[in-house]
């Protein structure tokens, strides 16, 4: 009968138009609820289902009948005839999904509603919003059955895909539904799996499909963008709250980060969307541990760093005030790293405190028992004090009470001592210090800038702990190479940039002069000390620091990039300044020559710098120092330049004393 109604009757009968649609839909739903149920609705839904007395059709037959009923219902609701009360029909379906709690009794109805919304968005989306369909969706997302949860997410996705921007904001924002989505999905699950992530990713980019994929979803096209970006934070929160011991969680993290990298690499708009999110660095760094223990965790950390590099490079290069993003990132990374170290340091105390809590519970029980014993002994002592021999019994009972009190007091003192030893201190963010994460992000950011030479970067303060000498020098050399192109090779005006960063006029060039002079001084030191350390075992801390300063940096970085050429630029060790240093000083002086006051300041600073170099160099020649000098190779420095003589043919004549002298640095 229902097959006939769903096919021939609906398609051919001319008398179908006057049928009362709302009443028909309600009657069909009533039949599904009370007669053609798959699982008895009595226990969970409280519905007294019919047809229990006599023989019932098999489950397969019931499912077939339900399919025909739902086909007829689908055709009735889809028929957009004039005067149709679609809202009332939809309300009847939503009421069914709200009052029926058995998964087998509502799954097919939910699937039918998804098809209706997907096929008739213009007609059903306004009604779905007006009849509070989202409320029903969140009721179903909290179901114990995963299939019901995923179907509810599909319905939610089709609704968001076809919503206007205003309707979407009015629906989601007042109740903070993106956060509620996390709580509902983890109500009956301990982690997010690949199937759930696939549906959430479809909603994120609004490319909904009717299938629920078990494996990884197809790679999105290059023109996809984040249509519901708040879901990024939702997915990250789900991953953070999931059971980290589950291997599927690591797989979902890998897929999620790979998708974000793919979409951010191909779209500046997607990068800008993430950068506009509040404290986006927090949820991104929460996806990994800064000190991973396994190879899979190390891979996750590398993906996180890669995404950081993409976003930070975009912020510095294209966004107004993007340098503030870098500062915020450094602070958040510092907070994350210091908190991890705090947890590792105090994990033992936390375990001890947990054991003390259990011990305290046992002590409370023991104390209650002692109190009962004390009361009993007191009563016995009072009764026996009036009889013969009462004095000795009273003394006996009193001694027992005092011994119990002494025992309790000693236990209290011991417990207080344990509490003092195992107290977990309050966490406070320590003073900033460089870490491996900071150095990795800075290196990646510089690599991005070096690749396209399209932005600027302030010189980092290298005086903090945690930044080794060779790494600090490598950053200075790389920044100097960038300055050759960005500062000296262009004619851009720095005034606007200085106003943006609230810097005083000329502040950028003064920073550049400090950079140039620092690199020049290091070039002076390279060959003066290199021969010394080639023949001497470095022992003291000062010598180790100087050796790190003058060591060749080529081994620290890759050299396949023109801007990563960290080999020494010293061509003539006898010169006070090398050609490249002279060029940089001249370029700094003539960079903004029209600013007379600024040019005068730079000229005076440069003259003072050159004067110091010249005086130091020729003072060491006239009065050789007894200790190694950065500007002159004395006998103690191991090179003996001041004792070297040259013949008429400019050939070097080595004194006999030098042949027998052992280099002593």
Image (cartoon, helix red, strand yellow):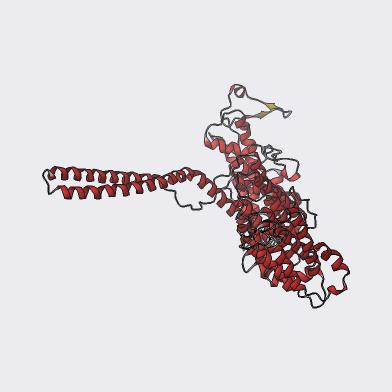
Q: Give the vertical position of 53 relative to 482 (above or below).
A: below
Please state which of residues 584 and 219 is positioned toward the viewer in this rendering. Answer: 219
When asked about the image quadrant of residue 103, the answer is bottom right
Give the total of numbered labels. Answer: 0
Please state which of residues 591 and 626 is positioned toward the viewer in this rendering. Answer: 591
x, y percent for residue 535: 60, 28
Looking at the figure, which quarter contains the C terminus? top right
Q: Give the vertical position of 545 relative to 313 (above or below).
A: above
Does residue 62 appear in this view? yes
Q: Give the vertical position of 377 relative to 135 (above or below).
A: above
* Residue 430 shown left or right of residue 589 in the figure: left
x, y percent for residue 467: 58, 44
When asked about the image quadrant of residue 636, the answer is top right
Q: Residue furthest left?
A: 388
Looking at the figure, which quarter contains the N terminus? bottom right
* Residue at point 10%, 44% (across, down): 388
Please state which of residues 115 and 257 is positioned toward the viewer in this rendering. Answer: 115
* Residue 411 shown left or right of residue 313 in the figure: left
When asked about the image quadrant of residue 119, the answer is bottom right
């Amino acid at each position: 009968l229902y097959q006939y109604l769903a096919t021939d009757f609906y398609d051919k009968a001319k008398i179908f138009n006057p049928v009362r649609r709302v009443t028909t839909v309600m009657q069909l739903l009533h039949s599904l609820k009370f007669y053609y149920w798959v699982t008895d609705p009595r226990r969970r839904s409280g519905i007294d289902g019919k047809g229990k007395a006599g023989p019932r059709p098999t489950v397969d037959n019931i499912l077939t009948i339900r399919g025909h009923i739902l086909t007829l219902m689908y055709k009735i609701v889809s028929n957009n005839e004039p005067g149709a009360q679609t809202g009332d029909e939809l309300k009847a379906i939503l009421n069914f999904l709200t009052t029926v709690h058995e998964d087998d009794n509502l799954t097919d109805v939910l699937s039918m509603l998804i098809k209706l919304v997907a096929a008739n968005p213009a007609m059903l989306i306004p009604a779905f919003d007006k009849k509070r369909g989202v409320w029903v969706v969140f009721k179903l997302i909290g179901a114990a059955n995963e299939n019901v949860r995923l179907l509810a997410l599909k319905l939610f996705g089709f609704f968001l895909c076809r919503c206007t921007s205003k309707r979407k904001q009015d629906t989601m924002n007042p109740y903070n539904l993106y956060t509620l989505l996390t709580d509902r999905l983890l109500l009956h699950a301990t982690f997010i799996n690949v199937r759930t992530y696939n549906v959430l990713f479809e909603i994120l980019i609004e490319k909904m499909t009717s299938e629920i994929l078990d494996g990884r979803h197809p790679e999105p096209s290059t023109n996809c963008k984040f249509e519901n970006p708040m879901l990024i934070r939702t997915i990250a929160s789900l991953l953070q709250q999931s059971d980290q011991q589950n291997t599927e969680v690591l797989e979902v993290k890998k897929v999620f980060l790979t998708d974000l990298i793919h979409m951010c690499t191909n779209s500046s708009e997607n990068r800008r969307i993430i950068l506009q999110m509040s404290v986006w660095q927090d949820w991104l760094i929460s996806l990994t541990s800064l000190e991973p223990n396994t190879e899979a965790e190390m891979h996750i950390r590398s993906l996180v760093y890669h995404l950081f590099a993409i976003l930070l490079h975009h912020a510095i290069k294209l966004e107004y005030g993007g340098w503030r993003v870098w500062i915020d990132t450094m602070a958040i990374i510092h907070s994350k790293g210091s908190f991890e170290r705090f947890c590792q340091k105090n994990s033992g105390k936390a375990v001890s405190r947990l054991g003390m809590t259990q011990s305290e519970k046992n002590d409370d029980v023991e104390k209650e028992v002692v109190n009962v014993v004390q009361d009993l002994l007191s009563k016995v002592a009072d009764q026996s004090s009036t009889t013969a021999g009462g004095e000795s019994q009273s003394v006996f009972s009193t001694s027992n009470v005092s011994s119990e009190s002494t025992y309790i007091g000693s236990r209290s003192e011991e417990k207080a001592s344990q509490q003092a030893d195992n107290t977990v201190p309050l966490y406070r963010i320590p003073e900033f210090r460089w870490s491996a994460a900071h150095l990795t992000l800075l290196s990646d950011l510089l690599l991005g800038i070096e690749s396209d030479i399209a932005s600027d970067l302030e010189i980092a303060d290298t005086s903090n702990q945690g930044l080794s000498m060779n790494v600090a020098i490598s950053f200075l050399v790389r920044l100097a190479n960038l300055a050759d192109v960005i500062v000296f090779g262009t004619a851009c005006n720095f005034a606007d940039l200085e106003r943006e960063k609230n810097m005083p006029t000329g502040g950028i060039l003064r920073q550049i002069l400090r950079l140039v002079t620092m690199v020049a001084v290091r070039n002076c030191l390279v060959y003066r000390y290199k021969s010394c350390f080639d023949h001497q075992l470095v022992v003291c801390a000062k010598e180790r620091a100087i050796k790190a300063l003058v060591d060749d940096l080529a081994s620290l970085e890759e050299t396949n990039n023109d801007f990563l050429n960290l080999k020494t630029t010293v061509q003539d060790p006898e010169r006070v300044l090398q050609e490249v240093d002279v060029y940089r000083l001249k370029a700094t002086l003539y960079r903004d020559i029209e600013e007379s006051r600024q040019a005068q300041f730079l000229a005076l600073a440069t003259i003072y710098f050159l004067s110091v170099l010249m005086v130091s160099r020729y003072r060491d020649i006239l009065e050789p120092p007894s200790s190694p000098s950065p500007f002159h190779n004395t006998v103690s420095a191991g090179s003996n330049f001041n004792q070297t003589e040259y013949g008429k043919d400019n050939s070097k004549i080595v004194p006999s004393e030098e042949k027998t002298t052992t280099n002593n640095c």
